Amino acid sequence: MRVLSSRNTQSNIVLRNKIDKIRLLFRKDKESYLCFYRILGFYPRNIQLYEQALLHKSTSVRSDKGRPLNNERLEFLGDAILDAIVGDIVYKRFEGKREGFLTNTRSKIVQRETLNKLAVEIGLDKLIKYSTRSSSHNSYMYGNAFEAFIGAIYLDQGYERCKQFMEQRIINHYIDLDKISRKEVNFKSKLIEWSQKNKMEVSFELIEQFLDHDSNPVFQTEVRIEGFPAGTGTGYSKKESQQNAAQMAIKKVKDPAFMSTVEEIKTQHVVTTTESKVELATNSDTELATKLENELEAELNVIPETKPENALEENTSDNEISTVQPTMEAGKTSQSKSPCDAPESLNRDLA
């Protein structure tokens, strides 16, 4: 039953192409139709949709009603349709695989980097209309146009024709589903995961930022493993430059000679860190010992200071006593020399 339905579909497509080819004889813009036919494998019905799909917003083109005319709306639609079609294809191709695997495989196909390459492969890059200042605006222009192109196919021909285009014209020619399902895409995430597993320190440093010949900003990032340069990447965004740098670093960590150097650097870092900790601990112990010694000495110095005060009090008491005693002795002396004894003294002197 499925085979019969497929045959009927193919017959309808062939018949429709013949009818569209006859209509083409009476059109003035034959070259445009033939150009899209070479890409699509069928003749467009509403060629304006495909032309709009290749119209970048930088052109500032407006419709008859004065509204901006570009591919952004078609890009939005094509993004959703592409997700559905690729999900359909991947689901049927990998029977028994779990949801996570299917999601990851689909994301690898519909990611901007893949769509950029596909757009170039089928020649969309030569048909996109844009401002000259945006010629290298960012590397996603072609991928965005590809999504818009899918949206145009959907509106012009429907879901089935759109799916047929993806299967026969794109995946069968340019994408190896088995290979791409095993492909590592998020290189930065993979590198960080590797570093955590192997207990390596990884850092991303923006080393340069400049403008290209069209005054578009370009970023250059360097990946360092244990402080050692492992790869550099350039892109029209920091994220893109980091991904490219991480991709290079992942290749480097598979090189035994490179990893040997990194291991030596890591060992040196460990030794240096250990020595610093020991020195810090020694300094801390020395400072603590000095502090305790000072405190002990301060406590000991309190005792000599207290004793002289007591001694002073004792000496003061002794002085008070000694002061009284001489007074008493002086009293006795004065008593011996009192007027009562005077005659005795005089008598001795006279005698």
Image: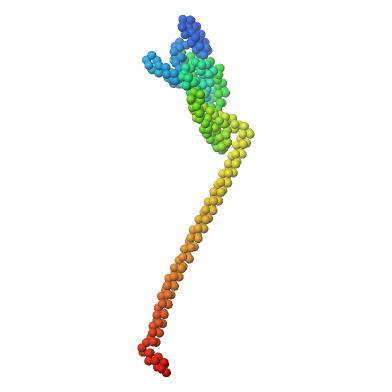
Furthest-front residue in this view? 350
Residue drawn 46% across and 19% down? 131
Query: Viewer-proximal residue, 276 or 253?
Result: 276
Q: Can you say whether 86 is above or below 198 in the image?
A: above
Q: Position of residue 93 (x, y in %)?
A: 54, 21
Q: Position of residue 25 (x, y in %)?
A: 48, 5
Q: Position of residue 106 (x, y in %)?
A: 51, 23
Furthest-right residue in this view? 257
Residue drawn 55% across and 21% down? 177
| Residue 324 visible here | yes
Residue 286 in the figure: left or right of residue 345 = right
Furthest-left residue in this view? 339
Query: Viewer-proximal residue, 252 or 163?
Result: 252
Residue 229: image quadrant is top right
| Residue 102 visible here | no
Q: Position of residue 56 (x, y in %)?
A: 45, 19
Label count reads 0
Describe the colour scheme in one phrase: rainbow
Image quarter in which the C terminus is found: bottom left
Q: Can you say whether 67 is above or below 326 in the image?
A: above
Residue drawn 53% across and 51% down? 284
